[in-house]
Image (cartoon, helix red, strand yellow):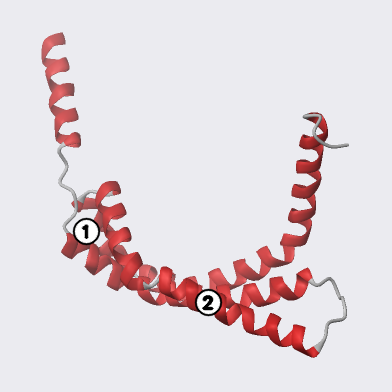
Amino acid sequence: MRNSFILSLLLSASVVCSAAPPSTESIDTLLVVTKSEALVSTMHAQMEQMMGQTLTGMLGGRKITEEQKRVIEAAPKQFSIIMKEELSWANMKPMYVSIYQETFTQEEIDGLIAFYRSPAGAAFIDKMPVVMQKSAIIMQARMPQLMEKMRTAMQKTLVEAGVAR
């Protein structure tokens, strides 16, 4: 009896360990169904806006010249161009495919595709850009407090280490 139980556990473990990795085609389908490329594009636009607001916030209300203002206002667009090149869908998609293949089984990918094709899954996908935008706004509002707390914690660490006073 005990031996058959151990054999049963070993067989179960081997089935779990040999679960088929998902096919590239099924991951492509999942990425299309979840509108992943559009989410990446939305992220780029939000990042450009956040960079502009962050630069403005870093000025702390200081008066700047028209030339300085022009440079600061142009910077987010320049940052965005770099980000779009480095984080383009063409560059990101192979990474997603690889990560999904390493993380999910074919059965799980099939289940995710079925979910995202359902009304609830479709609503989730359609509303995620709004969730991301609202989250970004809230996080940006919290950044000054967070940065101050981080600065204080870093200063405390340097004092405790005897590197600063």
Q: Which residue is more in the foreground, 143 or 4?
A: 143
| Residue 1 in view of the camera | no
| Dot 1 amino acid type | Asp
Task: Please provide percent x and percent y for residue 122.
Answer: 37, 73
| Pointer 2 or 1: first along the chain | 2
When the figure is inspected, residue 52 is found, relative to residue 10, above or below; the finding is below
**Furthest residue toward bottom:** 66
The mark found on residue 80 in the picture is: 2
Instruction: Provide the secondary structure element on which disc 2 rests.
Output: helix
When the figure is inspected, residue 42 is found, relative to residue 23, above or below; the finding is below
Instruction: Provide the secondary structure element on which disc 1 rests.
Output: helix
Q: Which residue is more in the foreground, 76 or 36?
A: 76
| Residue 13 in view of the camera | yes
Mark 1 residue crowding within 10 angstroms, few (<14) / some (14–19) / many (20+)? some
Quarter of the image where one finds residue 30: bottom left
Task: Please provide percent x and percent y for residue 51.
Answer: 63, 73
Quarter of the image where one finds residue 37: bottom left
Mark 2 residue crowding within 10 angstroms, few (<14) / some (14–19) / many (20+)? some
Task: Please provide percent x and percent y for residue 77.
Answer: 57, 82
**Real-space CA distance between mark 2 and mark 1, rounded to the nearest whole angstrom:** 35 Å
When the figure is inspected, residue 105 is found, relative to residue 77, above or below; the finding is above
**Furthest residue toward front:** 67
What residue did someone put label 1 on? 110
